[in-house]
Every structure is written in C-alpha cells, then in structure tokens.
Image (cartoon, rainbow, N blue to C red):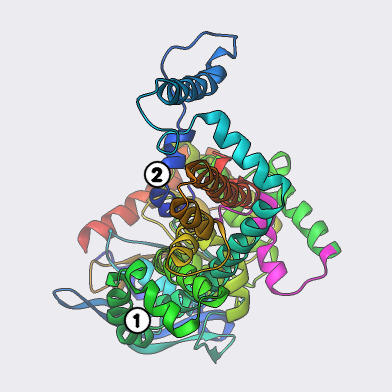
C-alpha cells in the first residue's frame, strides 16, 4: 500500500453529494464454465460533475465489468449505481459509452454512425444534419463523412465512436479502454485529441485504461484497482494544471506521478 | 477497428465467390481479350453439340441439332405457349419463394431471439429438413390438388430450410457490443430491429435468397413433373412423352434462364443494398 488509500472518499473531488454518477458497495459475481468468479468486491466511487476520472489496474481485474455496471448494461450482484441520486436499473441515454472496439455499424457511413443516437431519439433531420456536421468537425473527420467504416484506420474508427458517444450530449461519458486496440503512436495522439475534445465539451468522464501515462495525462483523479476480485486500492488526485498537452509526458512532476501509481499497482 | 463483417451467407454461395474472385494469373495488360474467353468456350461447346448431332451416330430424337432446338423454341414463342407455360412456372416459383422466405425469416428470427422457441422447435425443424421434400411431392399433390397451390407449397418448403438457417445465423452473429450500444442509447425493440438486426443480418439473408431462388425453380419443376396441366416442367414431361426432344431441351434452357434471372435479381439486390461491403 502507498498510503493513498486513505484519500478514498476525501471530500475534495469525490464527495458523494456533488457526484453525478456514483457506485455504492458494488460487488459482482458471475459464472463461467468452471465455477463462480468474483469480479468485484465492494467497490464504491463517485464521479463529480465535469471531472475526468481514470481507473487503472491489471488485466482481468474487473475494470470493464465495473464500467458495464456503471453503464447499467449489467446489474451488479450487490450494491447500486446512482445517477443524480437515483438508482439506475437499465442503460441510460444520459450516459454515453465508448467501447474497446470502435463498434461501428459497417453498413452506415461515418456520418450515419455518428448521427445514430440522434436518429434513435427522433431529432428532426435538419438538426441531425447540423449537429453531425459540427461533430465531424470536432473529431476531425469532415472529409470522411461518406466513407464506410471498412475503409477507416483504427484511430479514425475510434474518433467516430467518440463522436457518436458525444453527439446526443450525454452528461456522463464512460470509456472502456477506448485506445487499447491502437498502436502506441496513434494511441498517444488520440489521448491528445481526447484532451482537446474534452476541453470543448466538459463532461463527466470515467475512463478505464491500463496505460498509466494515459491516465495521468487525462485525469483529475486516478483510481487503482486490485487484481480479482477488484477493489479500489488507491485514489490519486492529479494536480497537474490544465490545459494539458502531450508535452506534459516529459515533465518531472508527470513522471513522478506515474511512478507513484506504478508502485501502487505493483504493491497490490 | 470495426467488427469483422458477418458474411457467412456468402459461404453458401460458393459459385458466385469463384466467379468473383480476381485471378492473379498473368493476363495481357491493357487488353480485354480475356473477356472473350468464356463466350469463345460457349461457341466451342455449341459446335461440339452440332458435330455430335450431325455425325449421324444418334437419331435426331435422341440428339437433335442446335438448329432444330432453336426452331422449336421459336415456334413456342410464336404460338404464345412458351410465355404461357413460363408464366405459370414463374408464378409458382415467385409465390413459393416469397412465402418460404417470409415464413423462414420470422420463424428464424423468433428462434434466434427466444430460447424457449429454439428448444421447442429446433428438433422438429431438423427433422423437417431430413424429409426429402421431392419425395413428398406426390403427397402434397394429393392434398392440395394438381393446381398451383401444391407447387407453391413445394417451392416454399424447399426454400424454407436454407433460409431459416441463414436467418438464425444472421441474427445470432450480431456482435454483443452493438447490442449493448443500442441498449445504452435506449433503443426500442423496433428500433433495434430496423437499425441493427435487419441491416446486420442482411448479407446472410441475401446469401440465403440467392440459394433459395434456384431451389424454388427446382421445386416448381418437381411439382409439375408429378402432376400438372401447365408450366415448363409439364412441357418437359409432355415433350418426353411425345419424343419431342427439341421441346424438352428448349424448355430446359428456358428454365435455366429463369433460374439465372432470379439469381441475378438477388445478386443485383445484394450489390445495391450491400455496397458498404466493398468499401474496404
């Protein structure tokens, strides 16, 4: 342990009353072929409005399970998820999700993929057109509006996924290792893009990642999860000033924070 | 990256894949001579047939020359009987196709989505597939008469199974993450059907349609062989009974053209609806 665990629930960023999305005492057990798997053990967390929180931890520690529970996609075995103080029982449009894979519909063009949430919400066509155009601009894909996903690189596909998750203006954005499938260079570039986009669209963001530098670069707060059954074993405030950029990656303060996190993960 | 496009439907459609696969063999650059190869081979086959007929080794009612088949075909066109018989068969084929495809689609969708339906119905559907439909054609004629109804049912039954399997595979192959996406956007079941399930299953469905189109033609001919008073299958049977071999061959060619036409329509539908598959 690093002594950071006592920061858990500290009033500054994580006070439950200011939280827009909160998890209380989440435990999750599921069955696979060989028996019961305890994925999560009594996890509680709170996401203050407009904060950027990252969750890091070793592979298979239940990070993605936690994210899917927060999204309302799977009901936890115990505990509850609160959105604005109300327990959620099903997925909510107010919570946008970006998955590990870009998860695009191959039969829809880039623009049509981005506009899907608006279509489902019965937004008038003219408004859909305008908002899609603006979103294409934001994610830097203006020239690719009519391209099909099959013709996109991994980074471009993930930009489309981010645009789709943002277009209906959800209050909370959950990102499940969104850059995990990308090569290192693209990944770094996408982190920078996400910083830029988030600066324009201040949302409450919860991002699962296994990259410590990525977490430190992006987040206001980084939570560390133990191997299975997943528990939150560290809660680090990232006091680096904003706006941030990729240049930060080489600052001593940044490197010190990543070291601190790495020690915490290793101690688990 | 995006999910691998679900295209197992194309596996059941091996012939068109062979036709579409680009050859990497050397071919003359800048010329289109290779396009003449297939027609040239056709001419060669025709010449072979003609030589065989003219050799005098076989009687004309066993191997009629191409010219007499063409003349017989033209007479059928002129007296309007070709159009009449083709129309009968086409009606049976298309009705059977529509009914079989629609029934298989809805049942397949139900089985893919509902576990109880799957457990209850699957054994019977497998048993049904094991029934040689062609063998029960006489039974269907007894039950539904020698008119169009029995043929439509035979066509529909032949079409049903491959279409059912394709529908189940198509709906089940939809990635969980896309379903999760629709759920996270609070899509209604109807929206999920139109915006996810239908387009995702479409490649496999159209693959099934291409197979079904030719199967349906077989169904109609089998039904007409057993008992009928009109249709191209009836015409073949009639020609055989009267040793009118040119008539038999002319009817076979017409049937082949009919099947190719339907297959072509399905392939055209595929090209129009699934243009996104070639975007990579």
In the structure shown, which secondary structural element does the residue marked by tag 1 occupy?
A: helix
Magenta extent: A104-125
Query: Which image quadrant for residue B93?
Result: bottom right
The front one of A218 and B121 is B121
Residue at the location (65% across, 51% down)?
B82
Provide the residue designation for mark 2: B14
In the image, residue A259 lies in the stretch drawn in magenta: no
Q: Position of residue B132 (x, y in %)?
A: 31, 68
**Relative to B51, is B156 above or below?**
below
Tell me the number on the disc at residue B118.
Answer: 1
Q: Residue furthest left?
A: A34
Left-right relation of A37 to B109: left
Query: Which image quadrant for residue B9?
Result: bottom left
Q: CA distance from mark 2 to mark 1?
A: 28 Å
Q: Residues within 10 Å of mark 1 (few under 14, many from 20)?
A: some
Q: Position of residue A68 (x, y in %)?
A: 43, 73
The front one of A227 and B227 is B227
N-terminal label among 2 and 1: 2
Q: Quadrant of the C terminus of chain B?
A: top right
**Relative to A34, is B265 above or below?**
above
């Amino acid at each position: 342990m690093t002594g950071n665990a006592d920061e858990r629930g500290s009033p500054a960023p994580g006070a439950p009353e200011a939280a827009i999305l909160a998890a209380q005492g989440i435990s999750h057990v599921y069955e696979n072929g060989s028996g019961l798997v305890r994925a999560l053990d009594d996890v509680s967390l709170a996401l203050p409005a407009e904060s950027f929180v990252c969750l890091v931890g070793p592979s298979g520690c239940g990070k993605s399970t936690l994210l899917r529970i927060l999204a309302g996609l799977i009901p936890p075995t115990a505990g509850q998820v609160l959105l604005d103080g109300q327990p959620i029982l099903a997925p909510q449009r107010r919570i946008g999700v970006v998955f590990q894979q870009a998860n695009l519909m191959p039969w829809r063009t880039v623009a049509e993929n981005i506009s899907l949430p608006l279509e489902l919400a019965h937004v008038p066509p003219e408004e859909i057109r305008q908002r899609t155009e603006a979103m294409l601009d934001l994610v830097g894909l203006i020239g690719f509006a009519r391209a099909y996903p099959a013709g996109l690189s991994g980074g471009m596909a993930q930009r489309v996924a981010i645009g789709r998750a943002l277009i209906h203006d959800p209050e909370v954005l959950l990102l499940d290792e969104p850059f995990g499938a990308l090569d290192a260079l693209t990944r770094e570039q996408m982190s920078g893009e996400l910083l830029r986009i988030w600066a324009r669209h201040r949302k409450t963001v919860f991002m699962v990642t296994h990259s410590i530098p990525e977490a430190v670069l992006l987040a206001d707060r980084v939570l560390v999860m133990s191997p299975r059954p997943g528990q939150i074993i560290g809660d680090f405030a990232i006091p680096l000033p904003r706006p941030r950029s990729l240049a930060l990656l080489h600052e001593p303060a940044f490197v010190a924070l990543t070291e601190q996190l790495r020690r915490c993960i290793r101690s688990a | 990256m995006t999910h691998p496009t679900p295209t197992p439907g194309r596996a059941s459609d091996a012939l068109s894949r062979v036709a579409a696969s680009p050859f990497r063999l050397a071919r003359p650059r800048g010329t289109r001579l290779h396009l003449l190869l297939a027609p040239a081979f056709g001419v060669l086959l025709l010449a072979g047939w003609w030589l065989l007929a003219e050799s005098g080794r076989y009687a004309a009612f066993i191997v009629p020359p191409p010219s007499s088949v063409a003349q017989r075909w033209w007479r059928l066109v002129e007296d309007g009987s070709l159009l009449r018989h083709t129309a009968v068969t086409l009606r049976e084929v298309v009705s059977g196709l529509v009914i079989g495809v629609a029934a298989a689609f809805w049942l397949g969708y139900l089985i893919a989505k509902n576990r109880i339906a799957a457990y209850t119905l699957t054994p019977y559907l497998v048993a049904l597939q094991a029934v040689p439909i062609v063998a029960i054609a006489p039974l269907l004629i007894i039950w539904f008469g020698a008119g169009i109804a029995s043929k439509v049912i035979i066509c529909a039954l032949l079409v049903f199974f491959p279409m059912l399997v394709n529908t189940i595979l198509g709906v089940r192959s939809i990635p969980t993450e896309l379903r999760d996406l629709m759920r996270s956007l609070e899509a209604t079941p109807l929206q999920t059907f139109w915006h996810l399930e239908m387009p995702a299953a479409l490649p496999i469905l159209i693959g099934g349609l291409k197979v079904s189109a030719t199967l349906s033609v077989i169904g109609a001919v089998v039904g007409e062989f057993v008992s009928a008073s009109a249709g191209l299958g009836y015409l073949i049977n009639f020609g055989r009974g009267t040793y009118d071999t040119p008539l038999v061959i002319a009817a076979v060619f017409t049937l082949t053209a009919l099947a190719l036409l339907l297959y072509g329509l399905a392939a055209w539908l595929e090209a129009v609806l699934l243009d996104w598959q070639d975007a990579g």
